[in-house]
Amino acid sequence: MTKRVRIAWVSFAAFFSLLASFALSHTAFAFDESTRVGQAQTTGKIEEFRLTSPANLAGVLNLEVGEDDICNVDFECWARAKNSKMAKEFTELVEVNLEKIDEVVTLELATPRNAPWEGTNYAVKMTLDIYVPPDVVLETKTSSFELDISGPLRKAYIKNRYGSIELSDVSEETSIAGSYNRVEVAELQGDLEIETSYNSISAEDVDTKGKRAFIKTSYGNIELENFSGQLEAYTVYSPIYASNITLLGGRNEIKTVYSKVKLELEGLEEAKLYVYNSYGNVDLAVPTDLSARLTLTVGRGGKINTDGILIKPQVLEKTKLKGICGDGDSEIEVDISGIGKILLEGR
């Protein structure tokens, strides 16, 4: 009997010790929050809007087009700290400066160097709702921001790390640079350059107006739909999907490794297309009236299949097909190093 009672007391002691540890742990990680809100506005003719933010400030940016000659900024600064007093102090350390010089408006977010929330479980976050006049030039430099930007804008130059980027409706030029970003763009015209890493890129309804689109990531998918112009698309260890693609002149290149390329061409006008892969398949759909010189090559153990298209063969080997479709006005080269399969299909 005594032994059973002793075991029971030991079990209850262990239970209460665990409960006390949990309570202390819970108390140690309890936080208070504070929020500061504000607004800034400037008026007059505006041709360009710039936003800069320090690396130690995360946030959300929602930017839309509003009225002519008005730039309006609504902001909310949120902070989390060990008590409400400290959280409030954190929000007051973030400066919001809106300035207009000539026709350029600059919104600068400023924080102290080595801010007290860096390297801790504390946090500070900005939410910005911005309205700019239509057809301005936009330039942003941020870190750890989630960006949602809608035009019409004339040009957009975006630099951001560790946050998603959504952009639509730009008429002349777009440049997006960052890392670890999921990038989604739509309704873009003119020069296009997108470069990120370790995440995906998707682009829809893009017309470069005969200029170049350069799209690059690593370890992330690339998805393109309704594209017209010149194209370079690169990734590694991830697939590339492109549908309703019209290539207009110049050199066009699509490349990945150890994954798949699926490309559906609607048109190829006096253009050169090079598709490269390693140990992965390439599915290429082309118009049945295609006019191009073809070179299809696979490594040993690979396969080449064609369907629904007339080719005048010049070289026909187990791992290589060279020939001409129509008058041969354009050029297509598909090269797979290592084992892989090329499917060329006329539609």
Image (tube, rainbow, N blue to C red):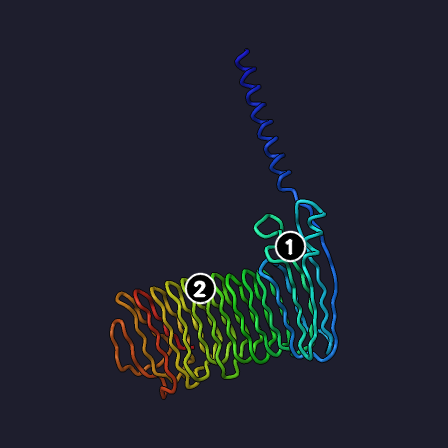
Is 221 on the left-hand or right-hand side of 51? Answer: left
Q: Which residue is mark 2?
A: 218
Which of label 1 and label 2 is nearer to you? 1
Q: Is residue 258 above or below residue 152?
A: above
Quarter of the image that includes the C terminus: bottom left
The amino acid marked with disc number 1 is: Val
- Image coordinates of residue 173 in percent, x first then y, are 56, 78
Question: Which element is circle 2 on?
Answer: loop
Residue at 40% over, 65% down: 260
Determine which quarter of the picture holds residue 154.
bottom right
- Image coordinates of residue 324 in percent, x first then y, are 33, 83
Which disc, if any, is residue 172? none
Quarter of the image that includes the N terminus: top right
Identify which residue, 181 or 300, lies in the foreground.
181
Q: Is residue 160 above or below residue 36?
A: below
Q: Residues within 10 Å of mark 2 (few under 14, many from 20)?
A: many
Is 31 on the left-hand or right-hand side of 3? Answer: right
The amino acid marked with disc number 2 is: Ser
Identify which residue, 277 or 285, lies in the foreground.
277
